[in-house]
Image (spheres, rainbow, N blue to C red):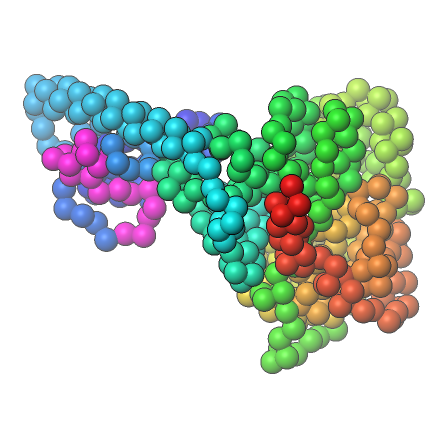
Amino acid sequence: MKYDDIYFLNAKEALRVATEQNISEESNNLQICYYEGEKIESDLINLIHLPLDTIVSSLENGILRLPTRVSSAGFDISLNEWKAMEGGFLNLLEEAKKLRSKRNQNYFIKSRTNNPNFNDKLRFYISAHSNTRVMQYSSKNIAQTLEHMGYEVYFDLYHGCEDFNCLKNIAEFNPHATININHVQTDFLNENVFSFTWIQDHWATSYLMENPKLRDRDILFHIIEHYGDMLKRKSIKSFYQPFCINSKIFKLRDEIKRENKIVFIGSSYKHAYDDINNEKKEDICKEVYALYLKNGYISSKKRAEIRSKYIIKTIDFSHIMNYIERDLSLEYIVQNNKDLSIEIYGYGWENNKKLEKSYKGPIEYGEKLSKINNSAKYSLSLAGYIMQQRTLEAAGSGAIPLVFDSRKSGADVETQGMMKSFLFFKTLDDLRKALDKNEDIDLSVVINENSFESFVTKMVNHINTF
């Protein structure tokens, strides 16, 4: 559903609608509610006080999207008065649009013509979206690390209300480099400004393959080797960079007693599985799950055979695999290891009856997440690749990563840290064997290999050696 950005004549009506936090499905934008009248004390980022007598100047100079219509809901006014007022408002809005467009064009030109002096202290512009659960924290951790290492940083957090044509912040900051997750955004950059993009999702890789236009100073990193291989087929150069650990947040906390328990942190994939429109999906899921229980990781060749057999879209089959590797695996482990203390944190598990005794609710990212990991001896990792963010954050917090062995996928570059710091189990029934081995685990190896400091140093070296 698409939601209009609305100007309300009645402040209470604006508050009511803003409280709903409506998000347009296609754009992922949060609906903005502007309003006339007395200012309301509120923390709602999409509730904007905008008196009629300042509407043109405020909208011209703002960075939020312009309203697309006016509402008289809750406002006592005659039809004739309303028609006159609506016409007047639309005229003011049109004037503001023209002024905003000219202003944005000026910022575009300024950004394109900015030519930063590389003898100055390096400046990094980093943007992120608050609606993301993983990407915004990757960006924030990079920003904090850059600041700690002495560089200037502008961390621009978008909330879904912004006018994406407004380049005010980046134009005035005049960075030497920009850093993005998944998106290569360079149309507005001077040719001498570096652009670093960390590819974390398949869709971003596919988009780059279809739109391979890159500048000399556009540097790409990929989170798993599969993405790098895909880009290489299109002669697009990219560097392997798995998730990193923010050691200032994810660290040992001696005041917390570590218990002999397992924690799992992650969200359910059931919603994506339920949305698959394929009448054979349950048959496919049953067949693949049986193979998974018997053999563990399922090879790419076998997956291709199953997709061909059932003539199922690759994306739909991926959703089935995610559901098996996450939801069904977690259910199996909990149901078949009732003597183990297992705690589950994340979204989408609240209606799963099989896990209700283990489910503890969602957990806030950051210090609270680190404390949960500090309270457990093990952290369970279930997925088609190994170097997940949650796995590394658990290691940083002292919880031994108990990892389903998917090394045959080729998604990860095998490192000393992976071998010395993780406990692997090849099938779900092997989990108990891994726990019984009680191997000598050295978490410091994987922590030192995957710090944000090392990632930032790679980016700075690219700039210094160009």
Front position in the image: 168 or 6 = 168
For image coordinates 77% across by 50% down, the residue present is 386
Span of residues in magenta: 42-59
Evaluate whether residue 371 shows in this view. yes
For image coordinates 74% across by 24% down, the residue present is 234
Quadrant of the drawing holding the N terminus = top left
On screen, residue 328 versus residue 122, left or right, reads right
On screen, residue 257 versus residue 133, left or right, reads right
Q: Residue furthest front?
A: 119
The image quarter in which residue 209 lies:
top right
Residue 394 lies, in percent from the top left, at: 69, 62
On screen, residue 463 versus residue 34, left or right, reads right
Quadrant of the drawing holding the C terminus = top right
Front position in the image: 198 or 435 = 198
For image coordinates 52% across by 46% down, the residue present is 118
53 magenta-colored: yes
Residue 130 lies, in percent from the top left, at: 47, 46
Establish if 212 lies above or below 239: above
Front position in the image: 346 or 163 = 163
101 magenta-colored: no
Evaluate whether residue 432 shows in this view. no
Front position in the image: 239 or 120 = 120
Q: How many labels does the image show?
A: 0
The image quarter in which residue 238 lies:
top right
Residue 122 lies, in percent from the top left, at: 52, 50
On screen, residue 154 versus residue 272, left or right, reads left
Establish if 363 lies above or below 411: below
Residue 69 lies, in percent from the top left, at: 26, 25
